[in-house]
Amino acid sequence: MVRLVLPLLITVAVVASLAAQQESTAATASLRKTLLSLTTQSQRWIDDNDTRSVQRITSHMGIVIDILATRGDSPEWKQALEPLRQAVKGLDAATRQGTKGAESTKKVEEVRKQVEALAAMTPSGKPMPAKAPAGVMKNFMYLLDSTLYDARTAADEGDLKTARLYVGSLTEFGGSLKTVKKTQVWSQSADAFIEATKTAANAKTEDSKKFRELLTAIRASCEDCHEKK
């Protein structure tokens, strides 16, 4: 009996480990896509000489990096994210110091370089519990809205693969959202949001119209939360 059970337990453990690794890889890909979008947005605001908006974007990047960091508890993973953190801090500092034009663009490109480097990285160690986002809650909501807008734009263009990546980020954001308050109503609303994002991410449809309906359901879960809070 023991000879039969032991291999089964080992198989179950291996399958569970592979599933967790795949989930972590998918989450990293989604968050990387959102970081690339934020990097592009920062350049647009620099071109418009809107320093306050650039600063808002760098704070959004900081939130995304913090969520990425929870994907692994190893010192190696923390160290791997450090160049990206420093690049974002460099862009933020340059903006606050009044740096403009080509110098600011250099800072943006450094951020982009570090974000693109994430494609070759895999989180190591055990996943950590989600944490409440740093900073003002309103700023986090702007990030959610921006990412949902990116998903809808991709869907409108017929690029459902990219739309699903953005929805994957929303799922990750939902985990952080749930930790903000400890009330039952808030927890239930956050769970509804997470479920709506997972439904969209896992949908087999390749029909843009149907996918947009799933995105509308995500938006509805947000509005329901606002009504209850």
Image (tube, grey):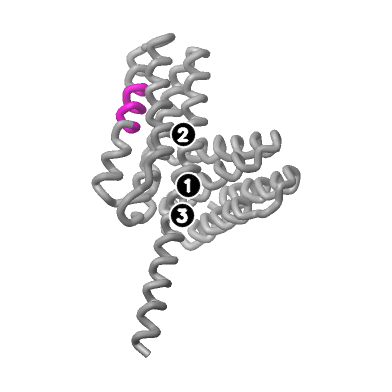
Q: Nearer the viewer, residue 26 or 224?
A: 26
Disc 2/disc 1 C-alpha distance (Å): 13 Å
Question: Which residue is found at the position 43% from the left and 60% from the top?
Answer: 18
Q: Quadrant of residue 160?
A: top right
Amino acid on which disc 1 is placed: Phe
Where, by quadrant of the figure, is residue 228 drawn? bottom right
Of label 2 and label 1, which has the lower sequence position? 2
The stretch of residues the image draws in magenta is: 84-92
Residue 72 magenta-highlighted:
no
Q: Amino acid at mark 3?
A: Gln
| Labels 1 and 3: the sequence-earlier one | 3
Element at label 2: helix
Q: Hey, what amino acid is under mark 2?
A: Leu
Residue 22 — which label? 3
CA distance for labels 1 and 3: 18 Å
Kindly report which numbered mark, 2 or 1, lies closer to the viewer in this rendering: 2
Give the side of residue 123 with respect to residue 49, left or right.
left
Which quadrant does the N terminus fall into?
Answer: bottom left
Mark 1 = which residue? 173
Q: Residue at x 39, y 16 (%)?
A: 106
The secondary element bearing badge 3 is classed as: helix
Which residue is outermost to the left?
75
Q: Which residue is mark 2?
A: 35
Q: Residue 225, how many percent across, how many down?
A: 57, 51
Q: Residue at x 50, y 43 (%)?
A: 30
